[in-house]
């Protein structure tokens, strides 16, 4: 099986490609906000792809840190702050652990989630944000991990399914955070773009993990 | 979409280039970070920085200059500036007395300024503080929203705080207190006749029927709180002015400054029609208007419509509002 850093590099690469491809969809979904989501995310992940040679030479936590700062420096807006925070905080928690185990990943993701929620102004599930996909995805991973029976592949399958269901639930929600919150009832009926970003990230992780096994 | 642009991604950079070339002695631009800074020498003052997504010009890149902002961080269109730009801008303009960030209340702006502040604190300075501006009465401040937005009332905060720093050398904590005081005394609300079109999307952000207007529209083309049938200017301006007046509330005997702010696509002549109506309403309520500002101050690209901001004055605000400042949008 490939080294963790190589799997992670592959995941980052596929995440970037999927999110660049999703530009139009994200922009459409963000018209309840301000239609800046798609182009910002495309710009950020193009910058990540441009740094791929440098990223290949790094260890797990430095890869995450590099991706986080690249996104925070190039996207701008809420997406840049939240995605940047997510990768940077995950990196901080992983620290110099070159071979983090599932439990380490879950701990790192939980600490990233906590800072994302604080930065968004105490964001909670049902506020119609990326948290609606991210929180259940991590919770599912954690629950499966605690059974002591699940493989990493099963954790990722569970996380992906939970993120997708969480993202689907945002369609009927009224936004309570971010710019879409200003329109109240009218924010109902469309998916939160941030939650879709999380779904695509877990989808990419799952695809790469399947291939590497 | 027909606009004076080349590539959507070049919108901000090319605009800043025009700004710099038109003001060669006064304005400098760091292009890769989209930082606009004043070039004239200044010492021994607290530096004032604002930043937000672009597309609201003249807010805020065009308010950089003696007596107002020392630097502005221009984000991509309608997206907050990145934290590295904020960090670099703070280091660039600090003169040893600290930096005050004046930030309009949007999730992305707050998050990026917060990350920048944490990074500056971690890396040993300069000392910074942040004041959040939230003057828009269209959004109810509750746990159900991201809170009241900062809109055109922010211009009063920049002007008064900028003058206090420039002319009187106030320290960081008194400037923050003053900024809070201005924010506490200003209220705004806007309406749109037509949506804006962002360069990236190329089509209107929201659809408004020929006979519809959006009351309480946001600065980014986010839909407002209520969509109503189009009506004559007298009625629309009354609804908006009353909403602003009731919120503080402003009362008979108050002395105020008003700002009739175009959202980018409305002719100045129409803004003066709105100004005339607002004056009559205020006169009837025995509220004295000492100063009137009519123009595009804080826009939403090409959106049609306007916002009305009212600031309750005191002697200090009056003095600082009229002190000279030297910024790119000076007229003759």
Image (cartoon, coloured by chain):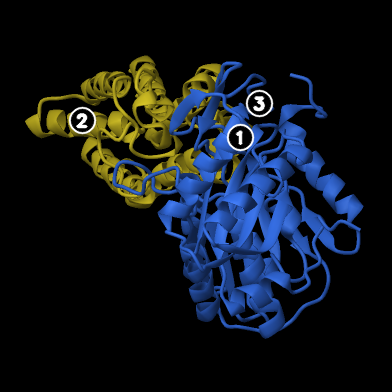
Chain colours: A yellow, B blue
Q: Are marks 2 and 1 in contact (CB under 8 Å)?
A: no
Q: Do marks 2 and 3 share a chain?
A: no
Chain letter of the residue beneath label 2 in the structure image: A
Q: Position of residue B2 (x, y in %)?
A: 78, 20
| Image mark for residue A94 | none
Residue at 80 percent across and 42 percent down: it is B15
Look at discs 3 and 1 and give the one toward the viewer. 3
- For mark 1, what is the residue? A53
Q: Position of residue B316 (x, y in %)?
A: 60, 79
Q: Secondary structure at mark 3?
A: loop
Q: Name the outermost residue toward the left.
A: A147
Residue in front for this viewpoint, A59 or B254: B254
- For mark 2, what is the residue? A141
Q: Secondary structure at mark 2?
A: helix
Residue at 46 percent across and 64 percent down: it is B184
Chain letter of the residue beneath label 1 in the structure image: A
Q: Position of residue B246 (x, y in %)?
A: 42, 52
């Amino acid at each position: 099986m490939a080294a963790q850093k190589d799997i992670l590099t592959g995941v980052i690469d596929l995440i970037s490609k999927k999110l660049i491809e999703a530009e139009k969809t994200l922009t459409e979904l963000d018209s309840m906000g301000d239609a800046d989501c798609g182009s910002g995310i495309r710009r950020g992940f193009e910058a990540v792809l441009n740094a791929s040679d440098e990223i290949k030479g790094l260890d797990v936590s430095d890869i995450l840190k590099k991706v986080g700062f690249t996104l925070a420096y190039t996207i701008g807006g809420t997406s840049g702050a939240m995605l940047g925070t997510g990768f940077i905080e995950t990196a901080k928690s992983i620290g110099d652990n070159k071979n983090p185990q599932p439990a380490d990943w879950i701990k790192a993701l939980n600490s990233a989630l906590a800072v994302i929620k604080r930065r968004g102004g105490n964001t909670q599930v049902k506020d119609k944000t990326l948290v609606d996909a991210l929180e259940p995805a991590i919770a599912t991973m954690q629950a499966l991990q605690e059974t002591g029976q699940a493989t990493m592949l099963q954790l990722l399958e569970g996380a992906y399914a939970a993120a997708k269901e969480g993202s689907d639930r945002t369609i009927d929600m009224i936004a309570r955070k971010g710019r879409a919150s200003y329109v109240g009832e009218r924010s109902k009926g469309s998916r939160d773009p941030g939650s879709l970003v999380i779904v695509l990230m877990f989808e990419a992780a799952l695809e790469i993990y399947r291939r590497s096994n | 979409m027909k606009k004076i642009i080349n590539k959507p991604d070049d919108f901000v950079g090319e605009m800043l280039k025009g700004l710099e070339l038109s003001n060669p002695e006064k304005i400098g631009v760091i292009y890769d970070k989209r930082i606009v800074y004043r070039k004239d020498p200044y010492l021994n003052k607290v530096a004032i920085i604002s930043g937000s997504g672009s597309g609201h010009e003249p807010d805020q890149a065009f308010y950089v200059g003696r007596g107002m902002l020392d630097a502005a961080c221009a984000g991509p269109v309608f997206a907050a500036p990145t934290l590295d730009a904020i960090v670099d801008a703070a280091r660039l303009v600090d003169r040893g007395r600290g930096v005050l960030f004046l930030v309009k209340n949007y999730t992305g702006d707050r998050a990026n300024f917060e990350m920048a502040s944490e990074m500056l604190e971690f890396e040993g300075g300069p000392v910074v503080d942040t004041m959040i501006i939230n003057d828009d009465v269209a959004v109810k401040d509750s746990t159900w929203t991201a809170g009241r937005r900062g809109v055109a009332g922010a211009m009063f905060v920049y002007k008064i705080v900028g003058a206090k720093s420039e002319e009187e050398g106030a320290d960081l904590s008194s400037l923050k207190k003053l900024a809070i005081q201005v924010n506490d005394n200003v209220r705004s609300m806007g309406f749109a006749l037509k949506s804006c079109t962002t360069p990236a999307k190329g089509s209107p952000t929201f659809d408004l029927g020929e006979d519809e207007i959006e009351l309480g529209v946001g600065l980014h083309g986010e839909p407002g709180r209520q969509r109503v049938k189009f009506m004559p200017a007298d009625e629309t301006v009354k609804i908006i002015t009353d909403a602003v007046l009731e919120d503080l509330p402003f009362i008979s005997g108050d002395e105020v400054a008003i700002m009739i702010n175009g959202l980018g696509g409305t002719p100045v002549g129409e803004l003066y029609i709105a100004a005339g109506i607002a004056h009559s309403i205020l006169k009837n309520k025995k509220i004295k208007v000492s100063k009137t500002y009519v123009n595009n101050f804080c826009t939403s690209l090409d959106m049609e419509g306007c916002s009305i901001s009212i600031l309750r004055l005191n002697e200090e605000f009056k003095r600082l509002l009229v002190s000279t400042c030297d910024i790119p949008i000076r007229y003759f």
